[in-house]
Amino acid sequence: MATFLYRLGRLAFRRRWCVTLLWVAVLAAVGFGAAKAPAAPDATNSMPGIESQKAFDLMEQRFPGTDADGATARIVFVAPDGQKITAADHRRAVDTLVERAADGPQVAGAVNPFQAEAKAVSKDATTAYATVTYKADADDLTDAAKHRLESAIEQARDTGLTVEVGGTALETQPSAGGSAEAIGIAIAAFVLLITFGSLAAAGLPLLTAILGVGVSMASIMALASAFGLSSTTGTLATMLGLACGIDYAVFIVSRYREERAKGHAPEEAAGLATGTAGSAVVFAGLTVVIALAGLSVVGIPMLTKMGLAAAGAVVVGVLIALTLVPAVLGFWPDAVLSRRARRSGRVKEGGENNGGSRWARFVLRRPVPVLIASVAGLGALAIPVMDLQLGMPGAEAKPTSTTERRAYDDLAQGFGPGFNGPLTVVVDARNAENPKTAVRTIEERIGATDGIVSVSPARFNPAGDTAVFSAIPSTAPTSEQTVDLVKSIRADRPATESSTGAEFEVTGTTALNIDVAQKTQDALIPYLILVVGLAIVLLMIVFRSVLVPVKAALGFLLSVLAALGSVVAVFQWGWGAELLGVETTGPIMSMMPIFLVGIVFGLAMDYEVFLVARMREAYVHGDSPSQAIRTGFRYSARVVVAAALIMMAVFSGFIGAGESMIKMIGFGLAVAVLFDAFVVRMALVPAVLALLGKAAWWMPRWLDRILPRVDVEGEALSHRAAALPATKNEAPTEARTEEEDTRPDFTTV
């Protein structure tokens, strides 16, 4: 492989115009396809294989014509302290608002809380709510429709009532971080500039990564209609496409600079960089693709599409790193060198005592204390995982500055905490002798269940064989007591069904969130086994070792558990939550563990491959085990640290978002990269390798014969380099022939 990639790198360097124009043509082609393609479909929340989804499907089948996709607005009215909402002046204000809202554009209907059938006034008569439904979904509501509702609400507030609105019609759209995210990207650029000491070297990875994301996103948009990809599918693709694209380009550029320091001409250096670092890029990319494609085992279509789309973005990032990066280096072969290297008349090849080698020597002298401290620290941070509670945060997790959150709190105070999360019971009475009697019996038994406050009258379909009613829990939607309540109702179901002859299922947003949490929790272990197992096999091929891949997998598990434990401590327990602007704690987002495992596994294996591959290369070329560790850190530690800092900066930008869920994702990814790059890869890995010695690179002969052999270390390239005539250290020039000799001094960067 190294020889093939070496030739590819040189070819891209020589044919730089062709390669660059080819990528520009690809971007233009997919961009044209995206512009001409039909609009992406709306995101669907289909969750096959869970009870809640089966109940929803039954409702759509038995209640035809019911429009469940239209936007809704639940307007909550609270009377001033000591007053009743039923007072004449307050009632008049409510009636006026409902009438104005009902006359608005795209409105399907409006229900006044004082209608006899509405039952929308609290027992203490201090709180009431009206419901406005629309013919269009929230994304298709016109500005006129929204403005009409907003003006009616403001008019009601002027009367002295507290008026808040929930639902989807005026829902605040989450921000991905705003200015904080822009600051994160700026920090990433600054880290690259400090690492390379050159604006060109700092800008090249950003430029090529952005182009790769552009190709990936345009491709997703072009294929959206054909494959049912919603607008949210590309979120993960953008995040990982940018992250991996920057990382891969950084490693190619860093190796190119190193080869130039050894006296190689630009074209030869580009070929050697692509053949050595490029080999690591290929296998690092494969591990990321495995992790993302493995998301399909969860069985959630949306997650599967997001994983495959992100995997495609990573593949594009690999291809750009192997072709476009050496092509761009061909245009400006000296621009990526440090300023001092470009100005110096003579340079020396240094770096023997840089920060990476000094840290490696420190760990090699104290491997046992470093190993114990690393494992103990990560293990302590992972303890909160034992109390992990999964769920899908709703309006209760929004900031109190939003009207949705205030409407949620007012309803919970006026009608009870369970009012915001009613359970929907769907009864299939086709096989019952008397459907109405069967439904009434089921209503009574569920209503008598501990934890149920009330049940609504059942509503039958036109055929009279299916009914739907709501059951209000006494506890909040995200409470563990509500989870136990749903399980209790379902556990008692067989006896009820056998006595009535009718079947029923529990659904609704609350039950759906519970089912999704259970589904993702059940899929986590199989997903880990699949992804980690395949990655271990792949790393065995790369490193020709049994213990190094196992060590890499165990280190990843430590870092991801510590990160998940930190998320639980902050967002569930509330430790330091106020520092991040988290106003309400609660269960962890159901898909957070899967997201964390998938994304962080890919990045962790990137750092593992780039760091340890250099150690393996030095060991194969004759270094002792301890010397190989120092060599790997001398050449790769700074770049791995820079890549990790870039990812942390980008992910930390999401912490500045207003939504608690986005804060959670940003915080979890940032601390996961922190733990994996700086604790596992920088401390635990060299400590373990130091203790193992030569055993770290041991592999049984029978296994060595079975596994395919690839030249990741560039052994064939080292023989070629040895055959080349030695050159003298000279200053970098603008010449672009193989005879030029430029050797920048990296100790000055």
Image: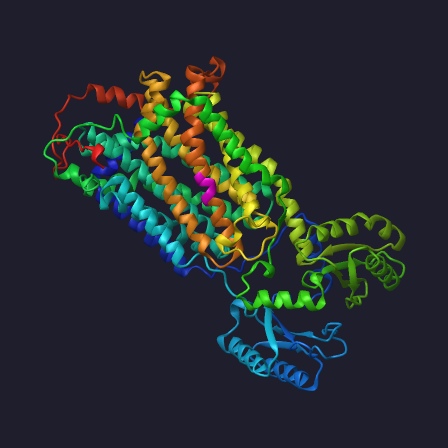
The residue lying furthest to the top in this view is 701
In this view, the residue in front, 409 or 725, is 409
Camera sees residue 520: yes
Residue 742, percent across and down? Answer: 15, 32
Q: Quadrant of the N terminus?
A: top left
In this view, the residue in front, 395 or 406, is 406
Task: Please indicate whether residue 528 sits to the left or right of residue 734 in the image.
Answer: right
Q: Residue at image x 46%, y 37%?
A: 675
Q: How many marks?
A: 0
Colour convention of the picture = rainbow
Task: Please indicate whether residue 725 sits to the left or right of residue 424 in the image.
Answer: left
The residue lying furthest to the front in this view is 82
Q: Which residues are magenta?
A: 670-674
User: What's the magenta bit mostly, secondary-structure-wise?
Assistant: helix
Asked if residue 555 is positioned above or below residue 163 in the image, the reply reads above
Task: Please indicate whether residue 620 sits to the left or right of residue 100 in the image.
Answer: left
Task: Please indicate whether residue 305 sits to the left or right of residue 517 in the image.
Answer: left
Residue 503, percent across and down? Answer: 81, 54
Asked if residue 406 is positioned above or below residue 336 in the image, the reply reads below
Camera sees residue 711: no
Magenta stretch contains residue 353: no
Residue 612, percent across and down? Answer: 39, 27
Q: Residue at image x 32%, y 30%?
A: 356
Asked if residue 493 is positioned above or below residue 738 in the image, the reply reads below
Residue 435, percent across and down? Answer: 86, 62
Q: Quadrant of the C terminus?
A: top left
